[in-house]
Amino acid sequence: MAIGDSFTAGAPGLDARWPDELAAALEPAEYHNLGVAGATTAEVADGQLGPCVELEPDLVTVVCGVNDVLLTVRPDIEAHAEALERIFSTIREHLPDATIVTVTTPPIAEHIGLRPRSRRRVEQGIRQLNDISRTLSRRYGVMCLEWGDHPLARRRENFAADGFHPSLTGIRRAARACAQALTGHPIPTKEMA
């Protein structure tokens, strides 16, 4: 089960989505992608969390938060934190044995052509999102993949032409990293190409 924003739902102009690539590697009996492009964390919690829990998945990927920073000049980081905690706590309460995976956000401000003041605001917001993801992941036993500080995170080839969404290369790297991190978990995997 994949829930989240456009990183999960798919980028405009790209047919590939990283959860699809991950599902191909894991070969699950069922796979659902509930992601919605442009969704904030609260919108993911309000619109995707209920259907996710009802389907009782063994693995849930949760990727959201960037829109909370990008869609406003005054990001409400506390609202993001509350919504993300609601997502993690609800999944953990209703699906105690499920593996939950989230990620830290790479430095997107570098490639989207922002003016200096806006760039500083986005960079600060992304740092705050990442701190929240790490803290809540520890609290709820969520696997948090470090993409924000990964050595490859800044490479331009990981980003689509808009400088924001992942490219096909970025999608495949994300899926491969997640599949490798899940090695040892009770989810059958096959080797990714």
Image (cartoon, rainbow, N blue to C red):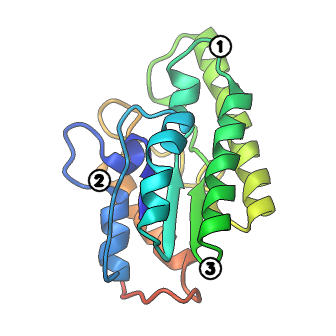
In the rendered structure, which disc, 1 or 2, sits on the residue that comes first in sequence? 1
**What kind of residue is marked 3?**
Asp
Of badges 1 and 2, the one in the foreground is 1
- Kindly identify which residue carries mark 3: 97
Where residue 42 appears, x then y in whole percent?
Answer: 56, 35
In the rendered structure, which disc, 3 or 2, sits on the residue that comes first in sequence? 3
Q: Which residue appears at 37% of the width and 62% of the height?
A: 19
Viewer-nearest residue: 12 or 49: 49
Q: Which residue appears at 61% of the width and 24% of the height?
A: 122
- Kindly identify which residue carries mark 1: 74
Relative to 169, is 125 above or below?
Answer: above
In the rendered structure, which disc, 1 or 3, sits on the residue that comes first in sequence? 1
- Kindly identify which residue carries mark 2: 168
Q: Secondary structure at mark 2?
A: helix
Q: Residues within 10 Å of mark 2 (few under 14, many from 20)?
A: some
Q: Residues within 10 Å of mark 3 (few under 14, many from 20)?
A: few
Where residue 154 appears, x then y in whole percent?
Answer: 53, 44
Where residue 27 appears, x then y in whole percent?
Answer: 32, 82
Q: Which residue appears at 54% of the width and 79% of the height?
A: 182
Using residue 146 as the reference point, say whether residue 180 is left or right of it.
left
Using residue 75 as the reference point, say whether residue 36 is left or right of it.
left
Viewer-nearest residue: 66 or 119: 66
